[in-house]
Image (spheres, rainbow, N blue to C red):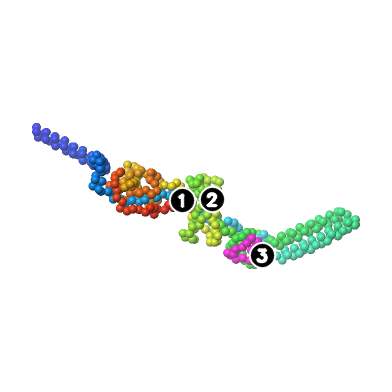
Amino acid sequence: MKRQVALWIQLIVFTLLLVASGALWFGREHVGSVFAALTDSANNTKGTPRDNRRGRKIPVVVARVTETANNVTVEAVGTGRAKRFLTLNPVTSGEIVEFAVRAGDRVKRGDIILRLDARQAELAVKVAMTKRVEAERLMARSEQLHGKSLISQAKVDDARNISQRSELELKQAEEALADRTLKAPFEGVVGIPKVEFGDRVTTDTEIITLDDRSVLLIEFEVPELYLSRVSVGHEIVGHTPSFGQRTFVGKIDQIDSRVDRTSRSVMARAVLPNPDDRLRPGMSFAVEIILPGKTFPVVPELALLWGKGESYVWRINNGRAEKIGVRIVKRLNSAILVDGKISNGDLVVVEGVQRLRPGGAVMLLSQPPQRSGLSSRLETKND
């Protein structure tokens, strides 16, 4: 009987040990915090924390909080074109007898591009001038005779009509002669000629291209998501493979009135100054539009911790640690934009967080500069 009682006692003790071991196993993550809480409670009852009674402080490495705007960089690809451009065609047919420009020449408005054979047109002008002189003489003689009542008024009217018609014929002949010369309609740079001296051309023949590239126009698409934040006059930055890392700054000049229902984007046109004439129409551009956002604190990535489904940082205030809950706004390369009760210039712990407790005394192993290396120009990009 006594042996059975002993076996039952052993079984009960074994069961209790098994239950205790299982509880410790499943609650192993909270044992430290419970023990620390009990220890802190015991120390508080004595009036002085244990570390403080022993004069010990937890060593930590800290960094200073900065702040930056949550800017969004919208990226797009566009193609540049000249402010004004066209392909010149002759007004009339004929043989080229003079070509006055070469590829790359800069011309002004009215400068001669080429001349066509104008011998027939010049003769037509001389004939028209002769007819006009004869018509003027006839008009003068008719008025003189009418003054002497030698001819009727109808004869005078006929002479006047002949004079007017001769004037029109002369203007037509002069216009035909002027059409034998092709001139630049505006200032710009000519391309490679498509014809040569001696070629016979018609009104359908393409002669040469002319570009006014004092500024370039770049058309690109802006996602509908950012349409309300983009307006005419907004600054853009352009990059082109031809110039590596060099940037070109321009402004949005026009925004389309409709959003494309397929791409869910709107077409925008930017003006890019080209004062040194280094940019060319047809170049591809990577366009960036920086949209300013709200300013948030920036902390190093190592300072952000997680616990119970929440993110937080340890802030140092008067030599003691404070646990501050924060919300992640954006992740940058080595830092994080957060939203919480921390301010620019606050100190946050980046190393030594394992032994920290709210209100615990700390010892700073290194004092960060007044401003950390994080620049206020940090930005996020829209992919």
> Label for residue 73?
1
Q: Element at badge 2?
A: loop
Magenta region: which residues? 99-117
Apparent side of residue 288 relative to residue 54 in the rendered image (left or right): right
Q: Element at badge 1?
A: strand
Q: Is residue 232 visible?
A: yes
- Crowd tier of the residue under label 1, counting other residues whose Cα lies within 10 Å: few below 14, some 14–19, many 20 or above: some
User: Is 102 inside the magenta-drawn segment?
Assistant: yes
- Crowd tier of the residue under label 2, counting other residues whose Cα lies within 10 Å: few below 14, some 14–19, many 20 or above: few
Q: Which residue is mark 2?
A: 233
Mark 1 or 3, nearer chain start:
1
Q: CA distance from mark 3 to mark 2?
A: 44 Å
Q: Amino acid at mark 3?
A: Arg
Q: Element at badge 3?
A: strand
Q: CA distance from mark 1 to mark 2?
A: 16 Å
In the displayed structure, would residue 280 be above or below residue 352? below
- Crowd tier of the residue under label 3, counting other residues whose Cα lies within 10 Å: few below 14, some 14–19, many 20 or above: many
